[in-house]
Image: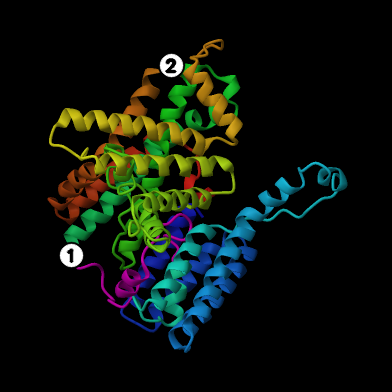
């Protein structure tokens, strides 16, 4: 069930009003959220819901044993192995089988064989990360073992289970036991929620939906487009993935606030980054901080010299790329970002840090954005061969085919979306300040007007969020 649908709006209004009644009950509110999340998840399919319940129950037993057993480390290992195997089987096993059966000799033996298709449970990558971090945090006594329903609510929390953000268990449990909305005045809280919804819907409906076709079709068949079309399409995807994914995070945070939880910051002006290290401190922050805390630091971090640090970065970011899918395009994307971060560290070690010279920093922002744009080509391509064709046609400026995308409106929308990626928090702050300056009636009137304009500018059919695929 998509956030931007009539069915979800009806579903959420019912859940929201019931949450107001049940929020003060430490006993019932976690169970209520768990049931609400199961209803939401059930719409993806019964088989997925059963798998989710089994996964949560097994992980809760592991958490319980970690907090009570005399040798908790074996239950930590068991839990981590279970989650990795669970993720690998559902997300990568079919790709692995396809690769094996393409090998010479094997493909002739099984050429007429048919194998059952393995469907990927919705949000499996995100709730696997939550499970692993929870196990580690309980083992490290960073959090106390929660009740079953608190744990169930955390793993299955419907605003975040599909595409994140990956909220930390410690923050989630603090909020679920607070029984109140975040500690702000009601006017400020209304302004924040309305701002997140308006900003998120503007990015998704007005910008993202328009950019979708231009950022999708050329990546499917790059040979059918000219160099200038592919160049424009690459920037269209760079713009699209920001407005689409950050819009999901905005809407998810708005829903979370209404249910009594603090927002999880996931983006801070990522396209204003001066280097790749800076980029990963601004982009998909809940994911990058998870990679740092649960992969990079356990590998040794920067504690054993620079060479070991660079190797750890390469491993962590490659695994981060692989997390998105079994396709080699994601591995290359992760490796390129790892190399970018390593180069950022090397330049930083040489004294090339952020300066106060706006021109110098602007040049670095443009160079970083161009590099990010190239890496998105690999990320969005179906195969490495497609990515190479895509890049080769741009580099050689192959104009044997007529251009289709040379359109002022398209270029303008791309520029607006990328600039939004440079000033996202500033835009949100201005909108929030505007709403905060109004009384309830003014907030309602302005909100209705802006929602109406956004819906009128949006398409009749809204494309799915990009990160639903992961």
Foreground pick, 179 / 214 = 214
Which secondary structure class fits the magenta region best? loop
Q: Is residue 4 visible?
A: no
51 relative to 189 in the view: left or right = right
Q: Are marks 2 and 1 in contact (CB under 8 Å)?
A: no
**Residue 371 placement (x, y as % from top left):** 38, 32
Foreground pick, 278 / 183 = 278
Q: Residue at x 20, y 45 (%)?
A: 431
Q: Is residue 206 visible?
A: yes
Q: Residue at x 46, y 61 (%)?
A: 11
Quick check: is 120 in the magenta stretch? no
Q: Name the residue that disc number 2 marks.
A: 406
154 relative to 55 in the view: left or right = left
**Residue 100 placement (x, y as % from top left):** 74, 48
Q: Name the residue that disc number 1 marks.
A: 184
Quick check: is 168 in the magenta stretch? yes
Give the mark nearer the N terminus: 2 vs 1: 1
**Magenta region:** 157-183
């Amino acid at each position: 069930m998509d956030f931007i649908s009539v069915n979800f709006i009806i579903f959420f209004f019912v859940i929201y009003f019931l949450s107001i009644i049940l929020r003060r009950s430490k006993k019932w509110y976690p169970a209520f959220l768990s049931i609400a999340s199961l209803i939401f998840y059930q719409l993806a399919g019964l088989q997925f819901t059963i798998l989710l319940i089994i996964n949560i129950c097994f992980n809760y037993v592991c958490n319980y044993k970690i907090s009570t057993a005399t040798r908790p480390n074996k239950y930590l290992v068991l839990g981590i192995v279970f989650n990795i195997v669970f993720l690998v089987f559902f997300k990568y096993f079919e790709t692995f089988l396809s690769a094996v059966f393409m090998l010479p000799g094997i493909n002739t033996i099984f050429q007429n064989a048919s194998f059952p298709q393995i469907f990927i449970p919705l949000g499996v990558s995100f709730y696997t990360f939550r499970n692993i971090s929870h196990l580690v945090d309980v083992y490290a006594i960073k959090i106390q073992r929660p009740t079953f329903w608190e744990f169930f609510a955390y793993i299955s929390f419907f605003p975040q289970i599909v595409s994140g953000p990956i909220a930390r268990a410690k923050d989630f449990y603090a909020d679920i036991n607070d029984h109140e909305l975040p500690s702000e005045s009601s006017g400020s809280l209304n302004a924040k929620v309305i701002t997140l919804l308006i900003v998120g819907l503007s990015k998704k409906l007005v910008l993202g939906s328009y950019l979708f076709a231009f950022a999708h079709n050329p990546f499917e068949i790059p040979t059918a487009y000219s160099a200038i079309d592919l160049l424009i399409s690459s920037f269209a995807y760079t713009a699209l993935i920001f407005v689409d994914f950050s819009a999901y995070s905005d809407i998810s945070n708005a829903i979370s606030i209404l249910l009594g939880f603090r927002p999880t910051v996931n983006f801070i002006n990522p396209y204003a980054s001066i280097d790749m290290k800076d980029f990963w401190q601004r982009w998909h922050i809940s994911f990058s901080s998870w990679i740092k805390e649960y992969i990079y630091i356990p590998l040794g971090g920067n504690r054993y010299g620079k060479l070991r640090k660079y190797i750890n970065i390469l491993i962590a970011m490659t695994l981060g790329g692989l997390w998105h899918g079994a396709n080699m395009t994601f591995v290359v994307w992760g490796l390129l970002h790892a190399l970018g971060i390593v180069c950022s560290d090397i330049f930083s070690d040489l004294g090339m840090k952020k300066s106060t010279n706006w021109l110098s920093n602007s040049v670095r922002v443009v160079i970083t954005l161009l590099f990010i744009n190239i890496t998105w080509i690999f990320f969005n391509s179906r195969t490495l061969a497609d990515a190479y064709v895509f890049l080769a046609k741009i580099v050689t400026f192959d104009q044997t085919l007529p251009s289709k995308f040379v359109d002022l409106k398209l270029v303008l929308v791309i520029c607006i979306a990328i600039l939004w990626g440079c000033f996202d928090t500033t835009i949100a702050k201005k909108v929030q300040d505007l709403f905060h300056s109004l009384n309830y009636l003014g907030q309602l009137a302005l909100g209705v007007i802006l929602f109406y304009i956004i819906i009128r500018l949006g398409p009749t059919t809204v494309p799915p969020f990009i990160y639903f695929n992961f």
